[in-house]
Image: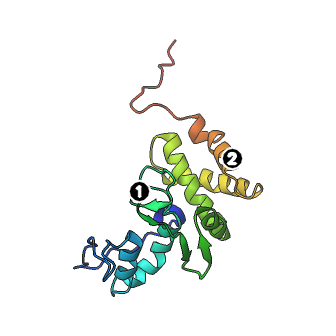
Amino acid sequence: MENILGTPPPEPPPNVPALEETEAEGAGRTLTLREQMTRHRTEEPCASCHKLMDPIGFALENFNADAQWRTHDGGDEGNLIDATVELFDGTQVNGPSELRAALLKYSPQFARMVTEKMMTYALGRGVEYFDMPVVRSIVREAENEEYSFSSILMGIVNSDPFQMRTKSGEMVANIEE
């Protein structure tokens, strides 16, 4: 949630039980991650936070840890992935494309987070308070192009922080020459 919408989840409460591989009762198979998380979300005090953050992850479930597309959980013989969810605002989505469309309702907030994360990568350092006017400017400009990825990318590339970046530890040339 923090990386997508800039809203960090609260710290987990003490004594939260671990998710373990659990047998599906009577089915003779291990529960999928989604089934484990659904079971986890029914237990307080976990439920209040997980109802907000789990749907975003489930909508992206078709991507594995290496960002490769998959249709089954646990390989070709595993369970078919169900990426259908209801988001925190009641919007129904199925998969990454519909999640993107739903998040566009929060465009300025979403675009700001994307811009900050991309600037961090582009600058090779974290975004600092003095970078925030540039971030806000890039987001305002990107609004004219419906927050397209290319408009954000070009805003970063053309920004002063990107144009004036130096390698870490590199000394500025002596001007005595």
Residue 12, located in which quarter of the rendered image? bottom left
For image coordinates 46% across by 61% down, the residue present is: 72
Tell me, yes or no, whether the two marked residues, 1 and 2, touch with CB atoms within 8 Å. Answer: no
Mark 1–mark 2 distance (CA, rounded to whole Å)? 34 Å
Image mark for residue 75: 1
Residue placed at 61% from the left, 73% from the top?
Answer: 93
Name the secondary structure under disc 2.
Answer: helix
Q: Residue furthest top?
A: 177
Is 157 placed above or below 64 here? above
Can you identify the residue that label 2 sits on? 150
Crowd rating for badge 2 (residues with CA inside 10 Å; few <14, some 14–19, many 20+): few
Amino acid at the residue labelled 2: Ser
Q: Is residue 91 left or right of residue 3?
A: right
Q: Position of residue 148 (x, y in %)?
A: 70, 53
* Within-10-Å neighbours for mark 1: few <14, some 14–19, many 20+: few
- Between residues 112 and 27, which one lies in front from this camera angle? 27
Residue 107 image position (x, y, % from top left): 66, 65
Where is residue 14? Give x, y as percent: 24, 79
Residue 110 position by quadrant? bottom right
Name the residue rendered at 54%, 75% in the picture: 85
Drawn side of residue 29 relative to residue 92, left or right: left
| Disc 1 residue type (three-letter) | Gly
Which of 47 and 84 lies nearest the eye of the viewer? 84
Residue 142 sits above or below residue 24 on the image: above
In front here: 47 or 60?
60
Query: In the picture provided, is 140 more to the left or to the right than 90?
Result: right
Q: Is residue 142 left or right of residue 160?
A: right
Residue 165 - label? none
Q: Position of residue 32 (x, y in %)?
A: 38, 70
The local secondary structure at tag 1 comes to loop
- For marks 1 and 2, the one nearer the N-term is 1
